[in-house]
Image (cartoon, rainbow, N blue to C red):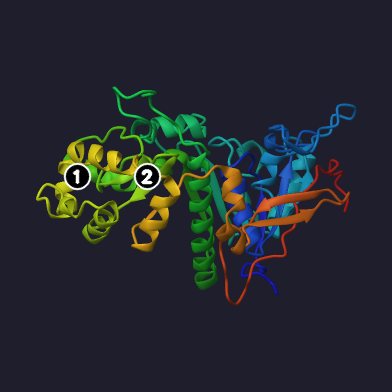
Amino acid sequence: MAGPLSHVRVLDLSRVLAGPWATQTLADMGAEVVKIERPGLGDDTRGWGPPFVQAPDPDSGRAGMAAYFTCANRGKRSVAIDFTTPEGARLVREMAASADVVVENFKRGGLVKYGLDYESLKAVKPDLVYCSITGFGQTGPYADRAGYDAMIQAMGGLMSITGQPDGEPGAEPMKVGVAVVDLFTGMYAATGILAALAHRDRTGEGQWIDLALLDVQVAMLANQAANFLVSGTAPGRMGNAHPNICPYQAFPAADGHLMLAVGNDQQFRRFCAVAGREDLADDPRFATNKKRVENRAVLVPLVRALLAARPRDEWIAGLEAAGVPCGPINTIDQVFAHPQVKARGMVVESRLPDGTIVPMVANPLKFSATPLGPWAAPPVMPPEHDGHD
């Protein structure tokens, strides 16, 4: 059965993560995605290993396929074209003429000299949806600067609220363990593209989507930004604690850590019952979430002492039975061994032309009428396109 976007053609001029994540999302939903890669070298992430699915060929100089590349490029076809040459640029313009969507993540104005910018391609395809992903957007004093995930996590405030607070062991601003700004930007790009396609289908009008990593990071500050805008006080680092809920953080049990996520007063009362300290739920300092947040400096040490007295799995079993959200802090191998992850089919496989198996994380969308799959492998590095089909 065809995916929900099987009628959409995407020309992918992006590389690394944010753009490829967007176009992979579209490919997962059935869109035909053609990725333009640099001859010989390909997407930068082909070389971001080990580990490799296919190692680079030192004799020919042909790029391989790092595991990193596989996370954002499945389901695409790849063509090697040097569009910095007149012939290469002509080929890409011809491809754009039959595409519904173009995605690119070059610096502002970087594609103008090749005739591959929005205005140039709009002249070729008036109803084109064109998405530009940059560090800082098409306007503003930083528009010409390059942007990378880690620096945007820093500039956009995320690192200022991530990590242990000052005075605690290991205290320092901390980036997240995956490139979340790139990933969120990819998801915003996919969402924006779908909205623009819906508009085009109603009106026949294409448009240009201007998407900046910094804008996305600011938007994804979510409740932390709202807290600041309302209070005027900038939030700081709280380790694994939550600024608006308590107790809602990691705690050490007798034999390992668990995450306790008490989200309301009823859950706190049930936690206290499992812990054998019903009196805490009636204590006026802790009876409501507002009071628990105000008195977290008193409550958290009490909870920490209670949890440290029993094994982790005993706590998890008791709290889950009582309807109190909690869970172990799993390592990545434990995640993929988890029965729920297995039941949801979150690991899929495909094969390269030479038979090499490529394991991949499945798209989490579950459609009832247009289920996703089968899953095509990421493209191997193609030879340079010579201008002939």
Residue 176 lies left or right of residue 243; in this view the side is right
Q: Which residue is mark 1?
A: 293
Measure the C-alpha gap from mark 1 to mark 2. Answer: 25 Å
Residue 123 lies left or right of residue 78; in this view the side is left
Residue 245: x percent and y percent? 25, 48
Residue 288: x percent and y percent? 16, 54
Badge number at residue 350: none
Nearest to the observer: residue 349 or residue 299: 299
Nearest to the observer: residue 290 or residue 265: 265
Count neighbours of disc 1 (C-alpha within 10 A) and say few if under 14, some if 14 to 19, many if 20 or more: many
When the figure is inspected, residue 229 is found, relative to residue 165, above or below; the finding is below
Instruction: Residue lying at the far left in this picture: please name it.
Output: 284
Q: Name the image quarter holding the N terminus.
A: bottom right
Amino acid type at circle 2 is Arg
Nearest to the observer: residue 302 or residue 223: 302
Amino acid type at circle 1 is Val
Q: Name the image quarter holding the C terminus.
A: bottom right
Tell me the SS state at disc 2.
loop
Residue 370 lies left or right of residue 299; in this view the side is right
- The residue at the point 27 percent across, 43 percent down is 303
- The residue at the point 47 percent across, 44 percent down is 329
